[in-house]
Amino acid sequence: QVQLVESGGGLVQAGGSLRVSCAASGRALSSYPVGWFRQRPGKEREFLASISWNSWTTDYTDSVKGRFTISRDNAKGTVYLQMNSLKFEDTGVYYCAARVNSPQYNYWGQGTQVTVSS
Protein backbone atom coordinates (compact mmCIF):
# COMPACT_ATOMS: atom_id res chain seq x y z
CA GLN A 1 0.00 0.00 0.00
CA VAL A 2 1.27 3.46 -0.90
CA GLN A 3 -0.22 6.65 0.52
CA LEU A 4 0.65 9.79 -1.40
CA VAL A 5 0.41 13.27 0.06
CA GLU A 6 0.80 16.43 -1.98
CA SER A 7 1.88 19.73 -0.46
CA GLY A 8 3.09 23.14 -1.48
CA GLY A 9 0.04 24.46 -3.25
CA GLY A 10 -1.17 27.99 -2.67
CA LEU A 11 -1.92 31.36 -4.18
CA VAL A 12 0.59 32.95 -6.53
CA GLN A 13 0.52 35.82 -8.99
CA ALA A 14 0.75 35.21 -12.71
CA GLY A 15 4.39 35.00 -13.74
CA GLY A 16 5.38 33.63 -10.37
CA SER A 17 6.71 30.26 -9.28
CA LEU A 18 5.61 27.50 -6.99
CA ARG A 19 6.92 24.05 -6.13
CA VAL A 20 4.57 21.25 -5.19
CA SER A 21 5.77 18.08 -3.53
CA CYS A 22 4.56 14.50 -3.37
CA ALA A 23 5.61 12.37 -0.44
CA ALA A 24 4.76 8.77 0.26
CA SER A 25 4.09 6.74 3.35
CA GLY A 26 3.81 3.02 3.47
CA ARG A 27 5.76 1.44 0.64
CA ALA A 28 8.68 3.53 -0.56
CA LEU A 29 8.03 5.70 -3.59
CA SER A 30 11.58 5.41 -4.84
CA SER A 31 10.97 2.29 -6.91
CA TYR A 32 8.07 3.56 -9.00
CA PRO A 33 7.33 5.96 -11.83
CA VAL A 34 5.39 9.00 -10.69
CA GLY A 35 3.25 11.46 -12.57
CA TRP A 36 1.72 14.85 -11.89
CA PHE A 37 -1.78 15.66 -13.05
CA ARG A 38 -4.14 18.57 -12.57
CA GLN A 39 -7.83 19.21 -12.75
CA ARG A 40 -8.85 22.71 -13.72
CA PRO A 41 -12.32 24.03 -12.82
CA GLY A 42 -14.91 22.46 -15.08
CA LYS A 43 -12.31 20.33 -16.87
CA GLU A 44 -11.23 16.70 -16.77
CA ARG A 45 -8.06 15.71 -15.01
CA GLU A 46 -5.07 16.03 -17.34
CA PHE A 47 -1.55 14.66 -17.42
CA LEU A 48 1.26 17.17 -16.83
CA ALA A 49 4.53 15.34 -16.33
CA SER A 50 6.07 12.02 -15.38
CA ILE A 51 9.39 10.73 -14.16
CA SER A 52 10.88 7.25 -14.13
CA TRP A 53 11.98 5.71 -10.85
CA ASN A 54 15.64 6.53 -11.54
CA SER A 55 14.98 10.01 -13.02
CA TRP A 56 16.47 8.95 -16.36
CA THR A 57 13.22 9.57 -18.25
CA THR A 58 10.86 12.52 -17.97
CA ASP A 59 7.88 13.46 -20.06
CA TYR A 60 5.76 16.61 -20.24
CA THR A 61 2.60 17.70 -21.88
CA ASP A 62 3.14 20.47 -24.40
CA SER A 63 1.40 23.16 -22.38
CA VAL A 64 3.95 22.98 -19.55
CA LYS A 65 7.16 22.21 -21.45
CA GLY A 66 9.81 24.78 -20.64
CA ARG A 67 7.87 26.06 -17.61
CA PHE A 68 7.47 23.02 -15.34
CA THR A 69 10.17 20.63 -14.18
CA ILE A 70 9.57 17.28 -12.53
CA SER A 71 12.26 15.83 -10.29
CA ARG A 72 12.63 13.39 -7.46
CA ASP A 73 14.76 12.75 -4.43
CA ASN A 74 14.57 9.05 -3.75
CA ALA A 75 16.50 9.39 -0.51
CA LYS A 76 13.64 11.52 0.77
CA GLY A 77 10.94 9.56 -1.01
CA THR A 78 9.63 12.73 -2.58
CA VAL A 79 8.77 13.88 -6.09
CA TYR A 80 8.59 17.55 -6.98
CA LEU A 81 7.00 19.69 -9.63
CA GLN A 82 8.68 23.06 -10.02
CA MET A 83 6.33 25.46 -11.77
CA ASN A 84 7.66 28.70 -13.25
CA SER A 85 6.03 31.42 -15.33
CA LEU A 86 2.66 30.44 -13.97
CA LYS A 87 -0.43 31.49 -15.87
CA PHE A 88 -4.00 32.02 -14.75
CA GLU A 89 -4.96 28.88 -16.65
CA ASP A 90 -2.61 26.81 -14.48
CA THR A 91 -5.12 27.19 -11.66
CA GLY A 92 -6.43 23.84 -10.48
CA VAL A 93 -5.99 20.93 -8.14
CA TYR A 94 -2.66 19.21 -8.62
CA TYR A 95 -2.39 15.47 -8.01
CA CYS A 96 0.52 13.10 -7.93
CA ALA A 97 0.14 9.46 -8.80
CA ALA A 98 2.37 6.40 -8.82
CA ARG A 99 2.49 3.32 -11.01
CA VAL A 100 3.05 0.55 -8.49
CA ASN A 101 3.71 -2.67 -10.39
CA SER A 102 1.16 -1.57 -12.94
CA PRO A 103 1.06 0.06 -16.40
CA GLN A 104 -1.60 2.38 -14.99
CA TYR A 105 -1.36 5.04 -12.31
CA ASN A 106 -2.98 3.09 -9.50
CA TYR A 107 -2.16 5.17 -6.43
CA TRP A 108 -3.25 8.78 -6.13
CA GLY A 109 -2.89 11.57 -3.65
CA GLN A 110 -5.70 13.81 -2.44
CA GLY A 111 -4.48 16.82 -4.38
CA THR A 112 -3.26 20.30 -3.55
CA GLN A 113 -4.88 23.51 -4.76
CA VAL A 114 -2.86 25.91 -6.90
CA THR A 115 -4.44 29.27 -7.63
CA VAL A 116 -2.81 31.73 -10.01
CA SER A 117 -4.16 35.27 -9.85
CA SER A 118 -4.12 37.35 -13.00
Image (cartoon, rainbow, N blue to C red):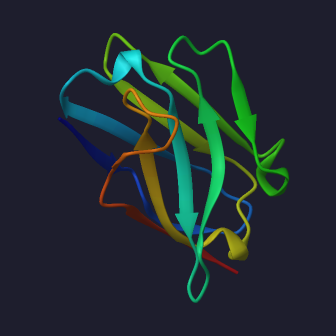
Residue at 73% across, 34% down: 59
Number of numbered discs: 0
Q: Residue pushed farthest bottom?
A: 42
Task: Please say if 41 is above or below 69.
Answer: below
Instruction: Tell me residue 112's x, y (percent).
Output: 38, 61
Is 65 displayed left or right of 16 in the figure?
A: right
Q: Residue at x 85, y 51 (%)?
A: 62
In which image quadrant can residue 13 be found?
A: bottom right
Is 65 on the left or on the right of 102, as rendered? right
Q: Decide: is 16 above or below 55.
A: below
Closer to us: 67 or 106 = 106
User: If the image is split into quadrants, where does the N terminus sit?
Assistant: top left
Query: Which image quadrant: the C terminus?
Result: bottom right
**Residue 105 position within the rendered picture, expressed as x and y whole percent measured from the top left:** 46, 44
Q: Residue at x 49, y 43 (%)?
A: 104
Spot occupied by residue 11 in the image (x, y as percentages of width and height):
48, 69
At 43% from the left edge and 17% from the top edge, which residue is drawn? 73
Nearer to the camera, 11 or 112: 112
Q: Position of residue 43 (x, y in %)?
A: 61, 82
Q: Would you place residue 59 above or below residue 16 in this image? A: above
Q: Residue 37, located in which quarter of the rendered image?
A: bottom right
In this rendered view, identify the residue nearer to me: 2 or 16: 2
Q: Is residue 91 left or right of residue 6?
A: right
